[in-house]
Amino acid sequence: MGTHEEQDVARHRFDVADAAPLLLDAQGVVTSWTPDAQRLLAYAAPEVVGTPATGLLCTEDAVRVPELAERCLRDGGWAGLLTARRKDGQPVRVMVRITPAVEPGGAPHWLVLLSDMSGARGWDMSRAVLEQMVTGSPVGIAIVDTELRCVWSNAALERYGGGSARERLGRRLAEIQPGIDSAGIEAQMRRVLETGRPVVGYEHVGEVRSAPHWETAHMMSFTRLDDDRGHPMGVYYTVVDISERYRARQRLALLDRAGEQIGRTLDIVRTAQELADMAVRHFADFVSVDLLESVLRGAEPEPGPLGDTDRVPLRRAGHQSVNPGVPETVARIGEVATYLAGSPPVRCLSTGRSWREERLDPLAKEWAQDIPGGRAATFLELGLHSVMIVPIRARGITMGVTTFFRRRRQEPFDEDDLSLAEDLVSRAAVCVDNARRYTRERDAALVLQRRLLPHRLPAQDAVEVAACYRPADELTGLGGDWYDLIPLSGARVALVVGEVPGHGIDAAAAMGGLRTAVRTLAALDLPPEEVLAHLDDLVARTAREEGVPPPEPAGIRAAGPGCVYVVYDPVDGRCTMAAAGHPAPAVVRPDGTVGFVDLPQGSPLGVDGPPFEAVELALAEGSTLVLHTDGLLAHGDGGTGDGTGDADRERLRRALEGGAPSLDQHCRTVVDALVPDRPHDDVALLMARTRLLGADRVADWDLPADPAVVADARKEADRQLAEWGLGELAFTTELVVSELVTNAIRHAEGPIRLRLIRDRALICEVSDGGATAPHLRHPRTTDEGGRGLLLVSQFAQGWGTRFVPGGKVIWAEQSLTDPPG
């Protein structure tokens, strides 16, 4: 095999037009000799045809012929320099190129082209000229032997340290440059020695002796040197300093990674910590991120720099160090650090400009003061020697400062480092500002959500209740689903679950309006189907006012809001319910079995559909009503997702049959079993376990329509109050009973019934067959009547009328905890 030097000449100096051709057979015997070959080597054709080609070469190259033949067979040819022997015995340097020449159907032959190189000027150069070329090269060059000991180096290599060429002789790389990865570099050399394949563009980063405190980068190339027989003699390598290019590439890569890894969430503190983590891993040893407290609250700071101030309190939002535990910090995450007036951080805040100090005064103290549990340490004690401070600014607003220190890296920060830090902080500042604005909007949205959903369900004795809400919009926590429990007259309760299409603040606002309307309608004691009818009118009217077109009938299921409204009476254990485009409730019976109410769905609210229908059913004490929105079942396979399909109901049945120690835990377990952590739809679940008011808490009497019965009604009420231990309410109760019974006898018709209920309040009810509701009047001084309901309203904490099949009920409640009257 020829040397690389020879091969290079073969590529660049070979001229086919000047070459002398000849043919060899597969065994290397000359089969054709041309006049050009005769002029080059002086042999006549009869003298060489039929003889081996090795006879045309000098002894040293003739020995190489078997190796060259193997290479020709393996590589399909060969090119290089050989020394031929003329007929007169004189050696001649020739360029040889061998290529296969196969005739169709014939035996393989080799075409050999010979070119005289004796006149090539490059080969007339003296050793002194060649040494001048490599010695004066600006590229560092060295040669090591097969033991990787230095045998030659040029002057350019001395600028990296490690001594002169004479001092390097016989030494390994680890002895010459102990600060670099000598093992990795020597591994490349050994590979080149073993394979013969050069290594080009190998990058190495480390510290050389000429710059012991700086990280430098070098581009190295390695080439094997062979003797004339092709045996390895050593490795020739070159070194080029590419530190500037390397640092530029590192800066671009850092900024790219910063764009990917900073601001992955809308959390201010996490974003600040991501900035500190990113910088420490790549060009600083300790980084702290301090923000104004107003920024952490999501408030809007004043535009521009902060202006002059004596003391500026900042809160530590993030920090990181190359040392475990961040020992350099004087403030922990979340602590307030007040920076002294005139200190560099305060100047950066007030001017909005960055600041850099290549070498810190080791005896100067850290600028932050008044830190809970902190210390006023010197920079020498903290081990910090170089610093940059960059204000965190976005949209013309200064939100804090980021401080970069070096401790382990000995080189100080330079202008390029400051430029990189400013680019890094400016990108992070946009993320911090987005997180700040999001925090402000989210806090406002959560205040809205807290106002819209009940903080806690009201206390009552009709049902034991538990609820769970999981919004699809995890960023804002807002959704269009809601639930509610509304106490009604007569110890009854209304249970409501509803949903508004969409997510986020618009859906939440629409939901709030519907929830308010439901509570207002519930206060009128209307039946469930009438409540939904009024809601339907309200939604349709609102849509018309906002210019929203009516939904197409084909999209009726998803067109408008849905709602299910249930009224439960703990006196007789009966409940009435109606639904508007909403799943029917499930019922968990006291024995743990699960059933589903056969409830007509009705159209969604705001859709011009048929009238809503209500159903009534009796529930055993301890039964659990399960009201939910579509989202609870929108995440399974094979179901409709709206709670009406068999697959949906089967999934819900399995979840409900699981049971739990408490109703609250059962509610959470059902949601966790059916809903992923990040649902695609909002989810609301309301579970109510029924109770019954015992006979000892309810008393009722049928009364004839005779004014004389009023006195008897008062006596019966007095007796019942004494039995319940409520004698202190006797006077006011007599007045309420007297006025309500008298009013029924005087103005109503049909049977009259008096009922007292001892719940959380004392409830007095008088029912009759009339369909006209009484009205509260304010009589004049001269009027002889009309004061009955006015007196009732004065002595009762609440009163009202509700209509029932066959008549109405007038009721009044008295507190059992507040003093009467």
Image (spheres, rainbow, N blue to C red):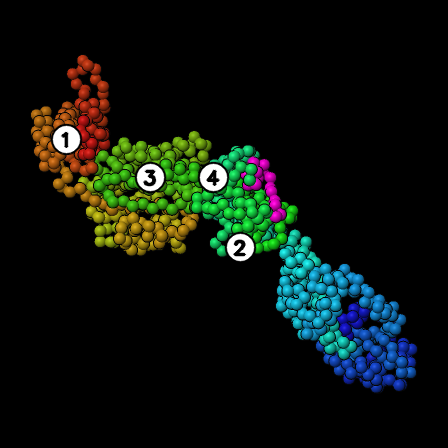
Sequence-wise, which precedes: disc 1 or disc 3? 3
In this figure, which residue is indicated by the disc labeled 2? 322
Query: Is residue 358 inside the magenta stretch?
Result: yes
Part of the protein shown in magenta: 344-359
Q: Residue furthest top?
A: 782
Identity, as a three-letter code, of the amino acid under mark 3: Pro
- Mark 4 or mark 3, which is nearer the start of the sequence? 4
- The answer to whether residue 754 is above or below residue 256 is above
Q: Amino acid at mark 4?
A: Glu
One can see residue 749 in this view: no
Q: Report the residue at 46% width, 43% height from top.
A: 371
Report which quarter residue 554 is drawn in. top left
Relative image position of residue 54 (x, y in whole percent): 81, 83
Frontmost of labels 3 and 2 is 2
Q: Amino acid at mark 1?
A: Leu
Identify the residue position indicated by label 3 in the image: 454
Rendering coords of residue 239 (x, y %):
71, 62
Label whose residue precedes the other's in the sequence (2 or 1): 2
Give the residue pinned by disc 4. Answer: 293
Q: Secondary structure at mark 4?
A: helix
Give the distance between the C-alpha atoms of the residues marked 1 and 3, in whole angstroms. Answer: 33 Å
Q: Which residue is mark 1?
A: 729
Which of labels 4 and 2 is toward the front?
2
Q: CA distance from mark 3 to mark 4?
A: 31 Å
Of residue 159 and residue 557, the one placed in the foreground of this image is: 159
Q: Residue 99 shows which numbered tag? A: none
The reply to whether dot 1 and dot 3 touch (C-beta < 8 Å) is no
CB under 8 Å between discs 3 and 4: no
Question: Element at badge 1?
Answer: helix
Quadrant in the picture for the C terminus: top left
Q: Position of residue 207 (x, y in %)?
A: 64, 59
